[in-house]
């Protein structure tokens, strides 16, 4: 680390630029671009729940970006059935919830409405060791406060959330962090490792669809998504020997899912820490596996993404 005495201005090592997009599908949306020396650069999206869009480590793109790309947030009421997919721009971290995760269920669309919620009270702090962005997001009946930190001199991003149920009733509170990775990191001789006890396919399609879940498949036209649970896993690490980079995802959440989309022109990997299944709230409630929050009860969770050289 470089001593503060040798730095005239933090901009020399770390910058944070807040802006409003002027053109394209995201016109009118806010963005916060964080750049750090020898770390992970981030594009934060305050109007998409302060989620993380594009990200780079030493010039290598980490995040998968959808065909639609960065775009304005939809209206929450428009996120019915499967419409979440067309409103999804990808990015390094997409938060799913806060009332439904996975399949549409109990009148809630795929993955809930969090992605349509705008962050308030967004503020950024800088030092010569890190850049921090924070804000609060209302996704009724919940209020989530978020803090995102990217480190200077170390490829480390940490996301901390605190969710409070502000209603007068006990509410189902599923949460999933959709960590999205694309080529060139998810490519070639890359491989995924976890500390899972076993890897279980979500359905018959996943069981029959791929020879392995730990290596990038060949792109195939119109291929279906494949989803697996890494039972008991607390971390996942993607290693790419050709690039000489490894990316490790850790979380406080108790479950870990993996999404693979091998379709040509989409081609993506997601590592998905969660406190729930991806089968929808009705399934988890019936199975006795749903996380609930009582009135005024709070829950804290964290996610780290660490990039390093081999």
Image: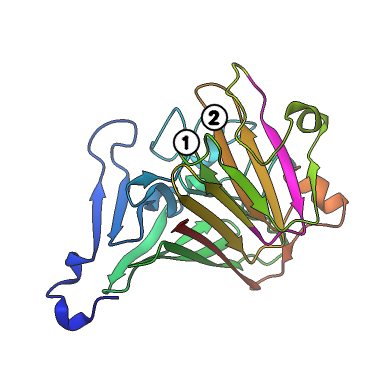
Where are the magenta residues, as a range? 223-235
Answer above or below: position of 135 versus 180. Answer: below
Q: Is 112 above or below relative to 80?
A: below
Q: Which mark is residue 290?
A: none
Q: Which residue lies furthest to the left in this view?
A: 8
89 to 282, vertically: above or below: above
Q: Residue furthest right?
A: 287
What is the image's colouring? rainbow
Indicate the quadrant containing the N terminus: top left, top right, bottom left or bottom right.
bottom left
Q: In this view, does 34 lie above or below 100?
A: below
> Which residue does the image show at 21% across and 81% down from the upper left?
4
Q: Position of residue 71 (x, y in %)?
A: 38, 36
x, y percentage for residue 76?
52, 42
Q: Mark 1 points at which residue?
A: 183
Which residue in the structure is indicated by mark 2? 267
Which residue is nearer to you in this view: 221 or 242? 242
Viewer-proximal residue among 29 and 294: 29
- Does dot 1 land on a helix, a strand or a loop? loop
Q: Does residue 169 appear anywhere in the picture?
A: yes
Circles 2 and 1 in contact, beta carbons < 8 Å: yes
The x and y percentages for residue 228 are 73, 42
Compare marks 2 and 1 and give the one earlier in the sequence. 1
Task: Assess whether residue 237 is covered by the magenta stretch.
Answer: no
Residue depicted at 68% across the width and 62% down the height: 234
In the image, what residue occupies the spot 82% across and 46% down? Answer: 283
Q: Specify few, some or many for label 1: CA neighbours under 10 Å numbering under 14, 14-19, or 20 or more.
A: some
Left or right of residue 73, residue 13 in this image: left
In the shown orientation, is residue 309 left or right of residue 301? Answer: left
């Amino acid at each position: 680390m470089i001593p503060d005495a040798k730095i005239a201005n933090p901009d020399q090592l770390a910058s944070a630029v807040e802006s409003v997009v002027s053109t394209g599908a995201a016109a009118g949306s806010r963005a916060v671009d964080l750049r750090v020396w020898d770390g992970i650069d981030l594009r934060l999206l305050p109007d998409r729940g302060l989620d993380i869009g594009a990200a780079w480590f030493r010039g290598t793109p980490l995040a998968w970006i959808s065909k639609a790309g960065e775009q304005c947030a939809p209206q929450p009421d428009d996120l019915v059935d499967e419409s979440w997919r067309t409103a999804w721009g990808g990015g390094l971290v997409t938060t799913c919830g806060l009332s439904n995760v996975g399949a549409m269920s109990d009148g809630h669309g795929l993955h809930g409405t969090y992605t349509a919620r705008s962050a308030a009270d967004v503020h950024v702090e800088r030092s010569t060791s890190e850049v921090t962005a924070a804000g609060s997001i209302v996704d009724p009946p919940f209020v989530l406060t978020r803090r995102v930190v990217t480190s200077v001199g170390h490829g480390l991003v940490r996301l901390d959330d605190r969710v409070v149920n502000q209603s007068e009733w006990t509410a189902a509170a599923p949460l999933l962090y959709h960590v999205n990775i694309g080529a060139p990191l998810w490519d070639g001789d890359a491989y995924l490792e976890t500390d899972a006890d076993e890897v279980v396919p979500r359905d018959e399609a996943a069981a029959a669809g791929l020879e392995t879940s730990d290596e990038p498949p060949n792109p195939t036209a119109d291929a279906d998504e494949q989803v697996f649970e890494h039972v008991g896993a607390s971390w996942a690490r993607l290693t790419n020997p050709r690039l000489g980079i490894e990316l490790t995802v850790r979380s406080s959440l108790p479950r870990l899912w993996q999404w693979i989309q091998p379709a040509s022109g989409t081609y993506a990997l997601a590592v998905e820490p969660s406190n729930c299944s991806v089968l929808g709230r009705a399934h988890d409630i019936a199975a006795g596996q749903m996380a609930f929050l009582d009135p005024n009860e709070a829950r804290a969770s964290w996610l780290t993404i660490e990039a390093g050289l081999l």
